[in-house]
Image: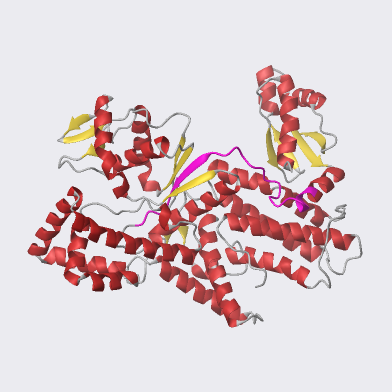
Amino acid sequence: MTSTYDLLRDRLRRAFDAIDEGADPVLRISERSDYQVNGVMALAKAQGVAPREMAARVLEHLEIDDLAEVEVAGPGFLNLTLTDSFLNAQLRALLGDDRLGVGLVEKRTVVIDYSAPNVAKEMHVGHLRSTVIGDSLARMYRFQGDRVIARNHVGDWGTPFGMLIEHLVDLGEDEAVASLSIGDLDGFYRGARAKFDADEGFKERSRSRVVALQGGDPETRRLWRMLVDESVKYFAEVYAALDVTLTPEDVTGESYYNDMLEAVVRDLDTAGLLVESGGALCVFPEGFVNREGEPLPLIVRKSDEGFGYAATDLAAVRDRVDHLHADEILYVVGAPQGQHFDMVFAVARAAGWLLDSVRCVHVAFGNVLGPDRKMFASRSGETIKLIDLLDEARERALSALRQRSLDVAPEARERLATQIARAAIKYADLSTDRQRDYVFDLDRMIAFEGDTGPYLQYAHARLRSIFRRLDAPWDGADVTFDLAESAERTLALGLLHFPEALDGALATLQPHRLSGYLFDLAQRFTTFYEACPVLSAPEPTRTQRLALCELCARTLSLGLSLLGIEAPDQM
């Protein structure tokens, strides 16, 4: 089906085009009517007429009587109120549409770079936002019909690996693998670092091992591969615990681009972009300066002839455009890396590697803070592991479920606690404007009231409980929506807004636009449920209200799934 928003926009665009081709109406959800149309005053200014006169001209060309009633308001706004017959038709169409009004786009290839942990280090709270935001965007893009290629750009190369490989040799392969396989990556790393700092002989061996690794020594590469494989196995366990769609096949570490780095330097030099500065090879992209107003360099090769992050990121851009044929590339990375990515994109475009047709965006995000509004850490000051965070949230959820006296088997209660814990953690992140910091407060996040993931899950479960109380399976094939009560109409309008919410989240790469919509829909349902009896209502009102409940449950379930959150039927 075509969404309500698209139908209205199409009629409005035709009317605006009749006056000034290319003029664009802006359609917004309104509190005073169902929708408000902006853009009339801009059109009036361009044509040199009074806004209300222009509104009258638009109305002359606007063929919308079958969809909405129109009123001119204020200095030239158009207020639209959907007709009862149109609302009925759209809601009936939604009942038969698994996609709830969301159309499929022409398939594109979208590469999303997210999560990016380091080999031989455990995933901690610092990886949370990239992982959760990136995964929600991947789900949304897939749902709208795009081909998504996830890239988990793990740190698996560089100087520290000489130290780690030597530590592995000292421990012996069996003991090292045993340590890594139980997820004690941090312990392994700390042991290697302690020896490196205290033992000159170990330090020298580590440096020699780096040379062997970079030179392609087979035995050194085998040991390195062992470290990488055990780490990737651990990452997969964390992603499974969080219900994140990343797989081992999505891991494309820094090492993948290693053989491409010489070509990056060579081709930048051929293009006349490379400049030697202080012994390093740099590019000075136009428009980037330091605090003193001096040109700012992007260092491609360091003075010691080693390659920096910039070279790897430039190689990644080339690979994603040339070999993956990306139409869009998203980098879900913290806000402090903004200038770095701006410079990388500028150099890639100057070199001709990043085409104008390819959208390339740094999807920046803020920090996770503790209750003291400082970087979130344990009481001892250590960074909190992601798996420990999930375990604590699960225990809180289990405790809350016990207090609710839910009549389910112990195994089902454990499963439900995991679903609630994931929802609490993910929703707290995704309901926040990603560019802002947010405070991690498990007590608030796990609550069944307020703007939380568990509240939305509970709203869905509450809806599903209505249908469990029916004597027979419900069939709403012949339902007619007359929406006599204001709470019914308010809920119905919310249901029609789902495609707009998803479109807004994708257009801005802001998942909180979708989560905000879901919270608003849940509140509309609560108001409806308190004002409008469902099972005790007479027919045909009972069937109509059951249909609204069915659509609301499906919308919450689908919307939550696009955020990576499950919607249990019982809570």
Picture quarter with the N terminus: top right
Classify 226 as above or below 111.
below
Q: Nearer the viewer, residue 254 or 508?
A: 254
Position of 399 with respect to 266 (left or right) is right
Q: Locate the C terminus by quadrant.
A: bottom right
Q: Is residue 504 above or below residue 533?
A: above
| Left or right: 362 in relation to 275 | right
The residue under the point 70% across, 52% down is: 98
Q: Residue furthest top?
A: 48
Picture residue at 46% right of the left edge, 61% below the top: 439
Magenta span: chief secondary structure: loop
Percent position of residue 161, x then y: 22, 57
Q: Picture coordinates of residue 549 (x, y %)?
A: 76, 61
The part of the chain drawn in magenta is 93-117
Residue, x 14% and y 35% (percent of image)?
279
Does residue 351 appear left or right of residue 280 in this picture?
Answer: right
Q: Is residue 336 above or below residue 78?
A: below
Looking at the image, the residue that sits furthest to the front is 218
Q: Quadrant of residue 237?
A: bottom left
The answer, for residue 297, to whether it is visible in the render is no
Query: Which quadrant of the structure image shows residue 12?
Result: top right
Numbered-mark total: 0
Name the residue nearer the viewer: 535 or 217: 217
Residue 428 appears in view = yes
List the single residue furthest toward the right. 539
Is 57 inside the magenta-drawn segment?
no
Q: Residue 325 at what x, y percent from top left?
A: 45, 37
- Whether the magenta-drawn stretch holds residue 111 is answered as yes
Residue 132, percent across and down? 48, 56
Question: Can you tell which quarter of the image residue 406 is in?
Answer: bottom right
